[in-house]
Image: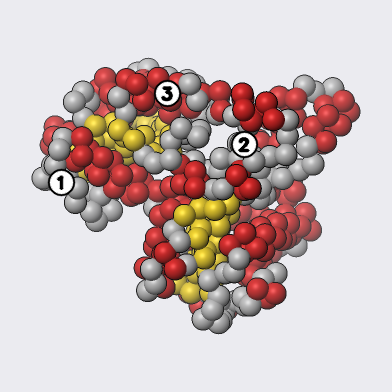
Amino acid sequence: MGAEWVLVLNCGSSSVKLALVDPASGERRVTGLAERVGTSGATVHLCRDGVEDTSVPEDPSSRGALTHLMASLDDGERDSLVGVGHRVVHGGSRFSASVAVDDAILADLHSLVDLAPLHMPANLLGIETARDALPGLAQVAVFDTAFHQTMPPVAYRYAVPRDWYDEHHVRRYGFHGTSHRFVSARAAEVLGRDVEDLRLVVLHLGNGCSAAAVRGGESIDTTMGLTPLEGLVMGTRSGDVDPGLLGYVARRLDLDVEGVVDALNTRSGLLALSGISNDMRTVCEAAEQGSPDARLAVDVFCYRAAKAVGALAVALGGLDAVVLTGGIGEHSAEVRRGILSHLGVLGLHEDPSANAEHGRGTSGRVSREDHPVALVVPTDEELLIARDTAHLAAQAVGEPVR
Ligand code: AMP
């Protein structure tokens, strides 16, 4: 194995994901997942050449689980690494692209923790642990927010007191940027067009959901904001609500603001509407079997996503394609149909046989007309992280960028 692989790490508060990715082909040699980290039930799963192995880390903390995962790599795999790519949730206004991490950058990243206190500490722990375990390798931070740094002020400013923005960084940032960036570029390839010439609305529909308006390959607006709570209905997140709800519910239920925000993040969305699950597969099955609450959950989800497409088509000044991705966007023909059923006004109509055929790993058109068009395009955030990492690692050691 030549020295061509990238270790991609996604360190969250309760799980750690690892993948050994070939940035050229996207091939995965090793994938790993540590679950329930920080609890006595912490478990590590590793898959190498199709063979799965499950073990229990000696130290169940995030650092312990990550160290255990990295120690599972063999010498050949370690020697093959050109760098380590880290998914980092928030780059604030400071980072508009991926960056090789040195001490100064690490200090900058620490200064952003307040913007995402649930995720950033785990992301930073990942960088620091990997730096210790694999000294000498480029550590690259790839931000969920960076792609949206091209949004103009008209899209990113909230109409809130000025000092909130000036002194406390309160503005819209947007998330899922790695996915929106990857999928926009792939959609242009699928359409045989230059991304420079396209006006796209990308719907990333997974456990978290967001839509982005991408013009000429750049994000000009998106549905998530200061935090990943704004915008579309998600698995357990409410998406947009009246901010006046916070005070009302806090008073009625005798909660503090953090308690209400926690409920909007963890006990809302599909889970709350359906009363059954945050998992769209389960909700769709229950709707099929006649549950009115599950049906309403699917309907609200699709309606809100379609309304966002309309709003973002206005932001774009026209629409060439709607691109669906993420676990739900890629796999649920029913949700795609539900969203498209609202978009006739934009000239989009489902092609039922194409819609039934695509997804499940293939890209393709799911609407009837040629323009505008609705496409399914599988996302691959790990591959984009691997490519950015290989690119920056090559620059760091003065090699030509491939
Ligand atoms: P992600 O966060 O991108 O992995 O997406 C996770 C979401 O995709 C969950 O809500 C899953 O239920 C959903 N999903 C995956 N496969 C399907 C499917 N065949 N039908 C409906 N939803 C699906």
Q: The residue tagged with tag 2: helix, strand or loop? A: loop
Most extreme residue toward the left is 2
Disc 1 residue lies near ligand 1 with CB under 8 A: no
> Which mark identifies residue 400?
1
Q: CA distance from mark 2 to mark 1?
A: 37 Å
Q: What amino acid type is highlighted by mark number 2?
A: Arg
Whole-percent x, y for residue 395 in the image: 20, 39
Residue 201 shown left or right of residue 384 in the figure: right
Residue shown at the point (44%, 58%) measured from the top left: 217
Q: Splitting the image into 4 quarters, where does residue 44 fall?
A: top left
Mark 3 lies on a secondary structure that is: helix
Q: Residue at x 73, y 34 (%)?
A: 160
Left or right, 133 with respect to 124, comes to left
Q: Does residue 260 sit above or below 2 in this rendering?
A: above
Instruction: Answer with the quarter of the image where residue 211 lies.
Output: bottom right
Horizontal relation, residue 15 to residue 275: left or right: left
Give the numbered dot on residue 171: 2
* Image height of 261 relative to 295, above or below: above
Pointer 3: what residue? 108
